[in-house]
Image (cartoon, helix red, strand yellow):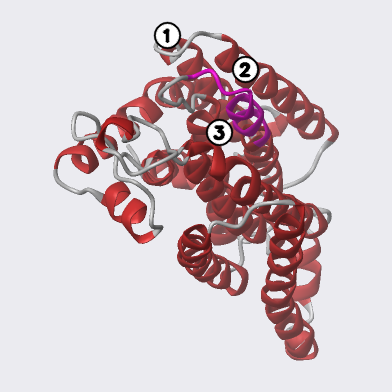
Amino acid sequence: MRSARPVGLFLSAVAVLLWAYGMTRWQPLTEPLGPWSERLPGNNAYWARDLRFMAIMAVSLGLVLAGRGQLRWGGPAVLLGGCWVAADVAIDRADPIGVDATVLLAVGGCTVLGVVAAIPLWWERRTSSAREPGRPQRERGAPAATDRRVLTGAACVAGVLTLVAAAMESPTDREPELNQGALATAALLVAVAVGAGLAAAPARTRARVVLAAGVTVAALLGAGLVRAVPPGTRLLPEAALGAVLLTGVTLLAWDWPGGRPVWWHHGVAALLALVGPVVFLVATAVPMMIALPIGAAFTSLAGNSPINAADSDLLVSLAGLLAGLGMAVLLARPSIDDRRQLR
């Protein structure tokens, strides 16, 4: 997909702006007024942190999309994401607030993004003269098999993170900013998932473009439905959203032999998309709550008040990332040969 590069860079830049806004406008709302034990926060108190972390993941996924799944882009994207999370913790500890801080973080983040994106771009231009004659033609057309798997995997990760963002809760569940942040983050991740799925297609046909538009609209409506449902009853609409979005990703990214999808393959994918994200989220969240207090460690490093002992400090963004990788193992098989390996 020729537009993958500008679309991926644009989505990464939007994610940077969302991260900066979340740090300076939403994070202060989640921090308690004092260190007194009776005011210690409860479950999901630091929802702004999870939304920021998912925005950082969207930055990296956008770079993967911009690089059309190539390793020279994927490696820096993953490294940037890890370094950005570390920087986020340090910045959170400084408690920035206000418009000036928002602008400063947004400009600084976009500058870093531009520098990181310039490195593989420079490398591509330097090596372009040494490529074999058939190489440029392939790069303008369908991506290589490995690159298609990477793009499909990125779409799966973004799809599962969409569910996590759309279902984000807080101890009170009355903050209008939470609804705004959850919907904005979910919409960004929907765009990344659909863009990566379409970029992984062997050819960008009109049918796939129309399908991409339909999946986008359906997923955005689904995210809005999840937010409209009261907390505690979001499991079914969340599972339905995952089924629609991830099945849509397979329809966009997988081969269509003879010009038509292999419907029973996508039927199996729909079943996996319906139950898989929830299973993976539970399988990753439970160990983090019981044996791996990763969320508490991040809270301490950021200088924030610990979660009440009766509750758990769960880093749901990390659980979403791991669950997305699990779904990628199952669904990032765009070619017929890839899916035959599962038999």
Relative image position of residue 310 (x, y in whole percent) = 19, 29
Q: Which residues are magenta?
A: 173-184
Label number found at residue 162: 3
Residue at 53 percent of width and 46 percent of height: 54
Q: Is residue 124 above or below residue 227?
A: below
Alpha carbon separation for disc pair 1 and 3: 17 Å
Image depth: mark 2 or mark 1 in front: 1
Residue at 69 percent of width and 23 percent of height: 220
Relative image position of residue 299 (x, y in whole percent) = 35, 51
Q: Is residue 146 visible?
A: yes
- Give yes or no for residue 26 being in the magenta stretch: no
Residue at 49 percent of width and 28 percent of height: 168
Name the kind of residue labelled 1 in the image. Thr
Number of numbered discs: 3
Label pair 3/2, CB-CB below 8 angstroms: no
Label pair 2/1, CB-CB below 8 angstroms: no
Q: In the rendered image, which residue does mark 1 sit on?
A: 233
Counting other residues with Cα less than 10 Å from the Cα at mark 3, is it few (<14), some (14-19), or many (20 or more)? many
Q: In the rendered image, which residue does mark 2 sit on?
A: 222
Alpha carbon separation for disc pair 2 and 1: 14 Å
